Image (cartoon, rainbow, N blue to C red):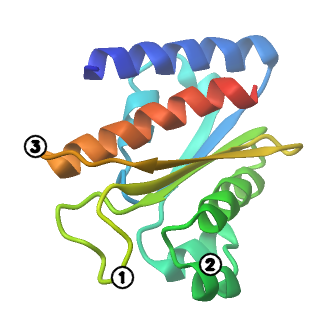
Amino acid sequence: MTEQKLTALAQRDFEALQQAHKTLAVAESCTGGWLSKVITEISGVSAVYLGGVCTYANSAKERLLGVRPETLAAHGAVSEQTAREMAEGVRKAFGADVGVGITGIAGPASDGTDKPVGLIYVAAANGATTVVRELRNEFRIDVREQNRYSAVKTALELIGEVL
């Protein structure tokens, strides 16, 4: 999949959000703002996109998104629970209808835990439900870029799913 295809997915989400009169906010960690970049390539997206935050540090996840310290202590930053709290937290923080949370280990080095490179969690929340996808990528070439790309693609797919 190319960057062009990500933009096409983002365009589809933009149109669906616009048609449903819904808004979007995103919280990114391992993708470092890539999802926001893809979304903001679309002219007129400010009608539905409220903004995003890149919360790399656990303290930022706690302070800006309301991720509970207990969640981080029990499950770690790279977990289904943290992704869920990120998505729900960014939705509430921005007053958006849909929130996305992405956290993972892009690589090529690990994060010092026993969690493998390529383990990524992507969550989308709409206030009624939160959907989380676990990715267990095993890319051999361009590991970091491929993992981040996979996470952005999954996030764009989940936005459509929770609408």
Q: How far apart are marks 3 and 1 (CA)?
A: 22 Å
Secondary structure at badge 1 equals: loop
Q: Which corner quadrant of the image does residue 27 belong to?
A: bottom right
Q: Which corner quadrant of the image does residue 83 belong to?
A: bottom right
Q: Dot 3 corresponds to which residue?
A: 141
Q: Is residue 142 visible to the viewer in this orientation of the structure?
A: yes
Secondary structure at badge 2 equals: helix
Residue furthest to the right:
128
Residue 92 badge: none
Residue 113 badge: 1
In this orientation, which residue lies closer to the viewer: 149 or 114? 114
Categorize mark 3 by other alpha carbons within 10 Å: few (<14), some (14-19), many (20+). few
Q: Which of marks 3 and 1 is nearer the N terminus?
A: 1
Please name the amino acid that badge 1 sits on. Answer: Thr
Q: Are marks 3 and 1 in contact (CB under 8 Å)?
A: no
Left-right relation of 122 to 139: right
Left-right relation of 133 to 138: right
Secondary structure at badge 3 equals: loop
Left-right relation of 113 to 90: left
Q: Which of marks 2 and 3 is nearer the N terminus?
A: 2
Please name the amino acid that badge 2 sits on. Answer: Arg
Left-right relation of 101 to 90: left
Q: What residue lies at 63% left-to-right and 85% top-to-bottom?
A: 74
Q: Dot 2 corresponds to which residue?
A: 63
Q: Which of marks 1 and 2 is nearer the N terminus?
A: 2
